[in-house]
Amino acid sequence: MTIVHIIILAFIQGLAELLPVSSSAHVVVAEKLLGLDPSAPPMTLLLVMLHTGTMFAVIVYFWRQWRSTYLRDFAAVRTIAGPIVIATLATAVIGEALIKIIEKTLLRGVAHAQIEDLFGHLEWIAPALVAAGILILGTGLWDRRGRRPEPLERDPDAREAGIIGAVQGLCLPFRGFSRSGATISAGMLLGLAKARSEAFSFALAVVLTPPVVAREVWRLMVAQRHDPSLHLGSIMGSCLLGAVVAFFAGLLALRWLSRWLEHGRWHLFGIYCLAAAAVVGYFYVAGI
C-alpha cells in the first residue's frame, strides 16, 4: 500500500462516505482494482481511519447547527442524548446479532472467521447496493410526489430512534448497504424533516465511529502477533494521512448532499446505487 493508494482511497472514501452511496463499497472495489486485499487487517483499519476523517468533517460541518440545537443548554443535551443512546443500543443489538449469525453460517468454513472476511466479496456488495438503491429511490419518489404528511421539524422520539438505530444495525455487516442512505431514508419515512433526519443520522455516525476504530486497532494488534512484519506504527501513520485527505473530501461531499436533499433530488442517489450495483456485478462476473 503506497501513499498514492492511500490518497486515492481517502478521496473516494471522503466523497462517498457522506453521500448515501456506500463509501465502503466504493473503497472495496477501488482496493481490488489496485490489487489490495480489502479484508486484510491494515486495510480494514485504514477504512475505519478514513471514516474517522469524515467523522471530523461531520463535526465541523454540523457544529453550528448542533450548537444551536443539541448543545445550546443542558436540557437540550439531555433531550437528544436519549434518542441517540436508544438508537445506538438498537444498532449494537441488531448489528452484533447479524454479525454473529453471518460468522456462524456464511463463514462457518473459515478458520477464526470474522465479519471482515466477507468485506472483499463483490457477490454480497452488489445485492446490498441494490437494497440501498431501492430504499433511497422509493423514499425519494415518495417524498417528491408529496405522498407523506407535513414533515416534523423535530428530532426523533424514542420509538423512531429505535427504528433508525435498528436500520443502522442492518447496515453494519454489509458493504454496499449505505448507512447514511438507510438511516436518512428511515427518518424521512417516519415523517421527520429531511434536515432533521440528516443531522440525526450523522450524529449517530459520530457516536458509532470510535468503537469501530477500536475494534479494528484490536484486530490489527492480534494479527501482528501472528505476523511480525505488520508494523502498527507505520500503518497508523499512513492511516492518519488518509484521514486528513478524507476530512477535506468529506466537507465537499456534505455541501453537495445538503443541497440535493433540500432540492428534492434524494431519489437520484438511489438510481446511482442501482447503477453501481450493476458495475460491481460486472466486476464479480469478470473475476476482479
Image (cartoon, rainbow, N blue to C red):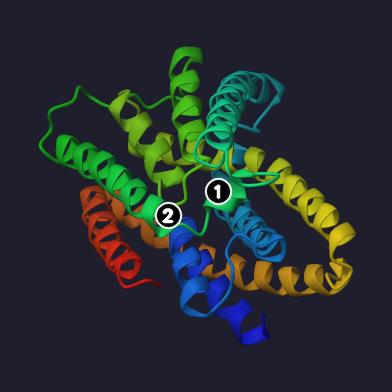
Q: Is residue 283 left or right of residue 10?
A: left
Q: Are marks 2 and 1 in contact (CB under 8 Å)?
A: no
Q: Residue at x 30, y 42 (%)?
A: 131
Q: Is residue 20 visible?
A: no
The alpha-carbon separation of the residues under discs 2 and 1 comes to: 20 Å
Which mark is drawn over residue 22? 2
Residue at the extreme top of the image, as rendered: 159
Instruction: For mark 1, give the secondary structure.
Output: helix
Q: Amino acid at mark 2?
A: Ser
Q: Position of residue 143 (x, y in %)?
A: 19, 36
Give the mark, 2 or 1, whose residue is nearer the N terminus.
2
Q: Position of residue 52 (x, y in %)?
A: 66, 56
Instruction: For mark 2, give the secondary structure.
Output: loop
Q: Position of residue 38 (x, y in %)?
A: 57, 64
Residue 39, above or below 233: above
Q: Residue at x 59, y 58 (%)?
A: 54
Q: Amino acid at mark 1?
A: Phe
Taking depth in this image into account, of 171 and 192 the one nearest to the observer is 171
Q: Is residue 121 left or right of residue 259?
A: right
Q: Picture quarter containing residue 79?
A: top right
Q: Position of residue 229 (x, y in %)?
A: 85, 73
Q: Is residue 227 visible?
A: yes
Which mark is drawn over residue 148? none
Q: Is residue 194 left or right of residue 79?
A: left
Residue 243, above or below 99: below
Numbered circles on residues, count: 2
Taking depth in this image into account, of 19 and 239 the one nearest to the observer is 239
Taking depth in this image into account, of 260 and 18 the one nearest to the observer is 18
Which mark is drawn over residue 62? 1
